[in-house]
Image (cartoon, rainbow, N blue to C red):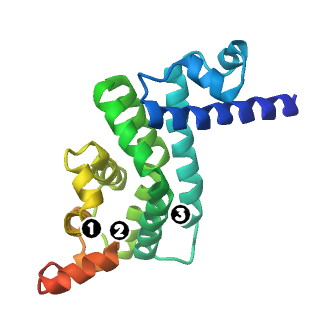
Amino acid sequence: MAKTAKHYNTKKNELVDIAEKLFLEKGHEETSIEDILNASKISKGGFYHCFKSKKEVLTESINSLMETSLAELEPIIEDHEADALEKLRLFMKRKEAFQQPKKEYARFLSMVMKSDFTLHKYYLALEQKYVAPPLARIIEQGTKEGVFHVQYPLETADILLRVVTSLPQSSFFGEYMENEVKHQNYSISLREVFARVLGTEISKIWLPDDENSAKTLTKQGGGLYGK
């Protein structure tokens, strides 16, 4: 029984991986179930044993991304030696490292979600389920330590995550990713938002691309690092 379940999950994961590549190459609407069958060498019956539709493959893909993200982040949350600021730094660094190879797929998902409200709601629900609670625990710890000043950690975590995860939906997403100056400006602005929402000094907030942002701040006279 366990062996059968393992084989089933393995086959589902293989189909998701193949479908993701096809979605990126051809687009979601242009990719047919027949395309997935041809690429995977699986029978139609084998496909429908795993998934009811092409859209279900896509939702499973998003679900897998979230579960993997949580597995990456959970050890940071459970570290009893690190303070909240260190956990926030590691949390954002690990999240960025995990997402880096998937930026093109994130762009693809954002385009699909713009035209599919149901899928967009599903994605947000998973963010709230998998990522918001761990971040909320960091914020709650920081509030107890006196470095953050937040009344409602979970709601604050939800707001900050929406700020971060909505980037691929921005009409400026391409410019932020490809133009170095605009990318640095975005990173600086994101740190400022985190600091203000968390009620702490900007100098205490570390976000991905922090080294590049620090160089830009130095050129600007360090204004954003003021108390």
Q: Mark 1 or mark 3: which comes first in sequence?
A: 3
Q: Which amino acid does label 3 sit on?
A: Ile
Query: Is the residue under label 3 in contact with that under label 1 (CB below 8 Å)?
Result: no
The quarter of the picture where the N terminus appears is top right
Q: Are marks 1 and 2 in contact (CB under 8 Å)?
A: yes
Q: Which of 68 and 193 is in front in this view?
A: 68
Which residue carries the number 1 mark?
149
Q: What element carries label 1?
A: loop
Q: At which x and y percent is residue 23?
A: 47, 32
Q: Which mark is residue 77?
A: 3
Determine which residue is flagged by label 2.
Answer: 143
Report whether residue 153 is seen: yes
> Of marks 3 and 2, which one's residue comes earlier in the chain?
3
Question: What amino acid type is highlighted by mark number 1?
Answer: His
Tell whether 186 sits left or right of 65. left
Residue 148 percent location from the top left of the image = 30, 70
At numbered mark 3, what does the secondary structure look like: helix, strand or loop? Answer: helix
Mark-to-mark CA distance, 1 and 2? 6 Å
Residue at image position (56%, 78%) is 81
At mark 2, the secondary structure is helix
Q: In this view, does 94 lie above or below 158?
A: below
Earlier sequence position, callout 1 versus callout 2: 2
Amino acid beneath label 2: Thr
Q: Where is residue 17 in the image (x, y as percent from the top left)?
A: 60, 38
Residue closest to the eye, 61 or 79 = 61
Q: Is residue 46 left or right of residue 122?
A: right
Q: What residue sits 42% from the left and 72% below the top?
A: 89
Q: Residue 201: in sight, yes or no?
A: no
Q: Is residue 199 above or below residue 215?
A: above
Residue 39 pos. (x, y %): 64, 28
Which class describes the residues within 10 Å of circle 1: few (<14), some (14-19), or many (20+)? Answer: some
